[in-house]
Amino acid sequence: MTLEAEHDLLYPLSMFRSARRIPALSYETMEGSEMPLPYRDLLVHDGDMTSRLEQFHGMAIYVDRLHSSEDGGAYFREVILRRESDEVAVEYGAIEISLSALPEDERAEVLAARRPLGGILNHHRI
């Protein structure tokens, strides 16, 4: 991650948009307590998004990979997370994953891009 990326709240989403020449997003920051419900319950927490989404929707979530790439030990992916039973989109996201931080089996599971990272980490108790 570059110094510029460290200060970019939307990284790696901004990287994916820039690569496709899509204009940068404008946004405002706010305190978690200012976030309206039900978004606060989904977005303001110290846990992982996967378990929050599965709890909120009452079903398993799977990855619909839009784009992915590897650069050294980093794996970048842009995804839509979908409900398993009816394929409804519940989240759009972009993530950078440090592959070197994962055991070999879990690394292969991340690269297969079927389950969200949070689901993999929770399943393997990492």
Image (cartoon, rainbow, N blue to C red):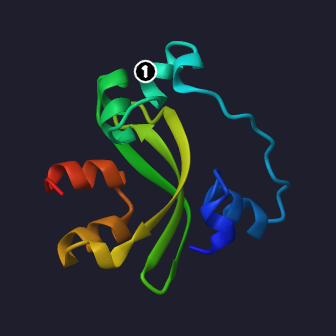
**Placement of the C terminus among the 4 image quadrants:** bottom left
Where in the figure is residue 87, as x and y percent of width and height? 45, 36
Q: Which residue sits at x=25%, y=55%?
A: 120
Picture quadrant where residue 47 is located? top left
In screen coordinates, is 58 left or right of 80?
Answer: left
In screen coordinates, is 126 left or right of 25?
Answer: left
Q: Secondary structure at mark 1?
A: helix
Q: Which residue sits at x=70%, y=58%?
A: 14
Outermost top residue: 37
In screen coordinates, is 14 left or right of 21?
Answer: left
Q: Which residue sits at x=35%, y=75%?
A: 99
Residue type for callout 1: Asp
**Placement of the N terminus among the 4 image quadrants:** bottom right
In screen coordinates, is 3 left or right of 105?
Answer: right
Where in the figure is residue 107, as x and y percent of width and height? 28, 72
* Residue 115 appears in view: no
Query: Label 1, on which residue?
Result: 41
Is residue 42 placed above or below 21 in the rendered structure?
above
Is residue 22 placed above or below 53 in the rendered structure?
below
Picture quadrant where residue 92 is located? top right
Where in the figure is residue 84, as x and y percent of width and height? 35, 37
Where in the figure is residue 94, as x and y percent of width and height? 55, 55
Outermost bottom residue: 72
